[in-house]
Amino acid sequence: MRSDLFDQGNLEREGVGRFALQNPQLLRVALGDDVLAVKGAMVAYQGRVEFVHEKSGSVGRMLKKIVSSEDLPLMRVRGEGEVFFAHEAGYVYLIALDGSDALSVGSANLLAFDATLQWDINRVKGAGVMAGGLFNTTLSGSGTVALCTVGSPVVLDCSRQPTYVDVQAAVAWSAGLTPQVVSSMKVGSLLRGGSGEAFQYAFHGAGFVVVQPYEHKPTSSGSGSGGISSMFDG
């Protein structure tokens, strides 16, 4: 049988490490230690592999998931073999954390990460009622994180000047940064429907923010403002 389909570039990559890109839109993970992945991200696997629902791990984190719009349904992947992950043909990027910094990621752009990493859900400062209450997932420790973007992203250096990013286009940023949620529109204009560019993250300091050329649609699960969610400001 002959076809361009069987070109070397389409054949499974082997001996390339634990986390590796099979191609720009497909992640290959060689199991050993467990991996946490977003449910539904697995597209294929080889070997003896088990997929188990990952619980929140603590009452506090469970409450944050309930009151926030940060819907992060995780599964624990364990066993022996190789697993392939992808999400809607998005572009996959790997970030190696060495314990010296942490990463804040939107759940819509998180694909998989080492189970040894610590993760938590945190509210973005200044994201109140009008902004819908914005939450992100913070990853820290030593290990690899796989992100998935819609289109090719840009990485902006926030140390040189104030940087403003549409809240639905922000993929991830250095957790050492403390973004504020700002609006460039007047209240009257917001009440009349606005321009669709009502809220932005404002970054300024040592660190970076990753931006994709696409705006995710806001989720409607929870306002994330007031009540219990006020405990998670910080």
Image: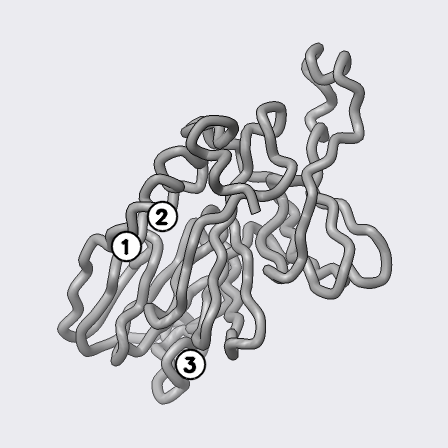
Residue indicated by mark 3: 8
Q: Residue 16, image x and y in percent?
A: 41, 85
Q: Residue furthest bottom?
A: 15
Q: Return the residue found at the far front.
A: 231
Residue 39 visible somewhere in the drawing: no
Of marks 1 and 3, which one's residue comes earlier in the chain?
Answer: 3
The residue carrying mark 1 is 57
- What residue is shown with label 2? 61
The residue located at (71%, 10%) in the rendering is 192
The N terminus lies in which quarter of the figure?
bottom left
Determine which of the numbered discs, if any, sits on residue 13 in the image: none
SS type, badge 2: helix
State left or right for residue 120 relative to residue 124. left
Query: Mark 3 vs mark 2: which is more N-terminal?
Result: 3
**Front position among marks 3 and 2:** 2
Mark 1 surroundings: few (<14), some (14-19) or many (≥20) residues within 10 A: few
Disc 3 residue type (three-letter): Gln
**Mark 1 to mark 3 CA distance (whole Å):** 42 Å
Element type at mark 3: helix
x then y, percent, for residue 43 = 30, 58
Dot 2 alpha-carbon crowd within 10 angstroms: few under 14, some 14 to 19, many 20 or more: some
Q: Quadrant of residue 125?
A: top right
At 34% from the left edge and 77% from the top edge, which residue is drawn?
Answer: 12
Q: Is residue 161 left or right of residue 15?
A: right
Q: CA distance from mark 3 to mark 2?
A: 44 Å
